[in-house]
Image (cartoon, rainbow, N blue to C red):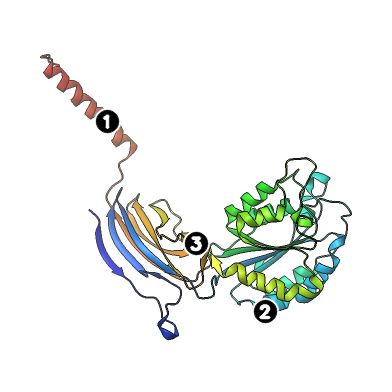
Amino acid sequence: MKRITGMVGLAAAAVSGGAMAQSIDPASYAATIGVGETVTINKTITLPAAGATKVDVFFLVDDTGSMGSTIGAAKSGATAVMNALPSSYRFGVAGYDGDPSEGVTAANAFNLHQALTTDKTAVQAGINLLVASGGGDTPEASNYALKQAADTLSWAAASQRIVVWFGDAPGHINTTTTVQAADALVAAGAKVVAFNNTSAGNGIDGRDTNPAGDVTNQASYIIGRTGGSLTNGFNASTDFVSAVTSQISAASSSLDLVFGSTYGGDGLGISFTCTDALGCTDVAGGASRTFSLAITGLKPGDYKFDVFARGVDAIESDMIKVTGVVPEPETYALMALGLAMIGVASRRRRNGTRA
């Protein structure tokens, strides 16, 4: 039987007016369980009023020749965008050209100019490396670049992830299909904020018709899978700072709650379940949701770890002691042999025979 050795709750701070700040309640939990035993803790998370507070924002820019005005606006306006957002946000930037299927090198198909960082000066320097050149044909490497961003960036474990995508041409599907790009973004938990320099159904919202088989309206499909927003007919010369800032803010104002922990060993089994009738997707800032944490003892030991949700600063601390001995494989084998011999002896006695 599990033995509860301590539990502390309601440690969340209150903001003015008595409203709860971002929190996970109970704020800490302690128990002693045996090997093979499971304890389940019911918790409530309350989001910050403004939505996500821990956010990774990655700028992904088509830097072929036709993107000169957007790249110019990005160079002049990027610092203003970053300064308008919370200082806790991290930013990064990459450009993309033609697709590897055209013979373009991987470094040019996804050219990482600055990894995710809170250093805004470094990010501005990375944006300044963007040069509108080349291209002259469509499609480009947007599908490939989106998948690379999803798969290879060092996203913070507790961050809400947003890819801010600028382009004016559809993506090749020879190297990476639109579905594969969307699958990778969903797996990474990344929303996409897309700015299409042309009209709906064209540009990044178009499709690759050679070879056939692409989904229609690539950007619309990707936004539909990941969340975020699509701005068609984007005029970078007049809209850059206000449009980009507002769409990033909108994307971070609600969260799809993804729970995690800082525990990475093999002594515990940890799983999360959303238990709220309203679900845990697209949760608005200031809202609360219930979820459960199930902890199974796998190896004896004392374990301390934190629980968090992506995009939220609040954490909850757990202290679990696992007691008992894990039987060795040889022990299981001897036990099985002993049980088998007992069974044979029992049958012989019932049949009137002796060993």
x and y percent of residue 319 in the render?
Answer: 34, 63
x and y percent of residue 47 in the render?
Answer: 48, 71
CB within 8 Å, label 1 to label 2: no
Q: Nearer the viewer, residue 106 or 256?
A: 256
How crowded pointer 2 is (Cα within 10 Å; few <14, some 14-19, many 20+) is rated as: few
Circle 1 sits in a helix, a strand or a loop, which is it? helix
Sequence-first tag of 1 and 3: 3
Q: Residue furthest front?
A: 200
Dot label at residue 83:
2
Looking at the image, is mark 2 or mark 3 nearer the viewer?
3
Q: CA distance from mark 2 to mark 3?
A: 26 Å
Looking at the image, is mark 1 or mark 3 nearer the viewer?
3
Which residue is rendered at x = 34% and y = 74% of the image? 10
Q: Residue furthest bottom?
A: 16
What amino acid is labelled 2 in the image? Asn
Q: Nearer the viewer, residue 189 or 33?
A: 189
Give the total of numbered labels: 3
Q: CA distance from mark 1 to mark 2?
A: 67 Å
Dot label at residue 257:
3
